[in-house]
Image: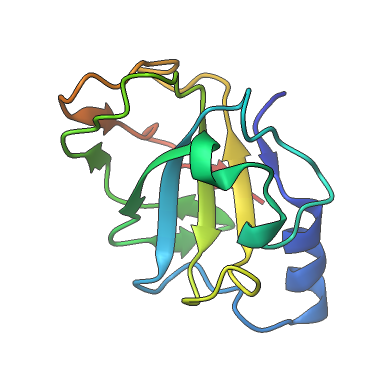
Amino acid sequence: MANAIYNKYKEALLSDDSDIALDGNNVKISLVDSGETPFRSTDEFYDDLANTEVGVLETANLENTSVTNGVLDADDVTFVNASNTSIDAEALLIWIDTGQANTSRLVAWMDTNIDGLPITPDGSDVNITWSTSGIFKL
């Protein structure tokens, strides 16, 4: 799979649905084992993901998000003491946390050209450094 913005997120943007903004404190990023929790373009909310109990390894806040000229950017991310050593992380998942899995909107899946991935967490920090051109562009 190549990096992708979820179709249902794009649909929500065009329909002006709720919980679509990427400029708040509720934007999350997760390390994902794509063998356990694969990308499916039809997924819309966090509870649509397959096998999240096994496949989502670590989650952090995406801090200081900004959107300029259609480009999402944010601070680099550190997953502190990432410790699930039995599973590889091959992808990143960006999502909007509403506090309920059935309304927490999936935004983007990233598994291509991400420095440091894949990785098997070993208890040390996992650092994700974004490109100088941003995370993604619409």
Name the residue at 44% across, 18% down. Answer: 88
Residue nearest the viewer, comparing 52 with 98? 52
Res. 21 image quadrant: bottom right
Side of 47 relative to 40 (left or right): left
Viewer can see residue 106: yes
Colour logic = rainbow
Task: Return the x and y of residue 49 as percentages of the image width and height.
Answer: 67, 49
- Horizontal and vertical percent position of residue 34: 60, 27
Report the residue at 24% width, 30% height from top.
Answer: 83
Q: Is residue 134 visible?
A: no
Residue 45: % across, % down: 68, 63
Q: How many marks?
A: 0
Q: Is residue 119 above or below residue 89?
A: above
Which of the pair 71/8 is nearer the observer?
Answer: 8
Q: Is residue 15 left or right of residue 129?
A: right
Question: Based on the displayed image, in which of its 4 quarters is residue 26 positioned?
Answer: bottom left
Q: Is residue 103 above or below residue 138?
A: below
User: For this view, does 138 lie left or right of residue 67?
Assistant: right
- Residue 127 location in percent, x, y? 25, 30
Identity of the residue drawn at 42% across and 49% down: 29
Q: Is residue 89 above or below residue 59?
A: above
42 w.r.t. 133: above or below:
below
Kindly identify the residue that appears in the image at 31 percent across and 32 percent down. 128
Q: Name the quadrant of the N terminus.
A: top right
Q: Nearer the viewer, residue 86 or 137?
A: 86
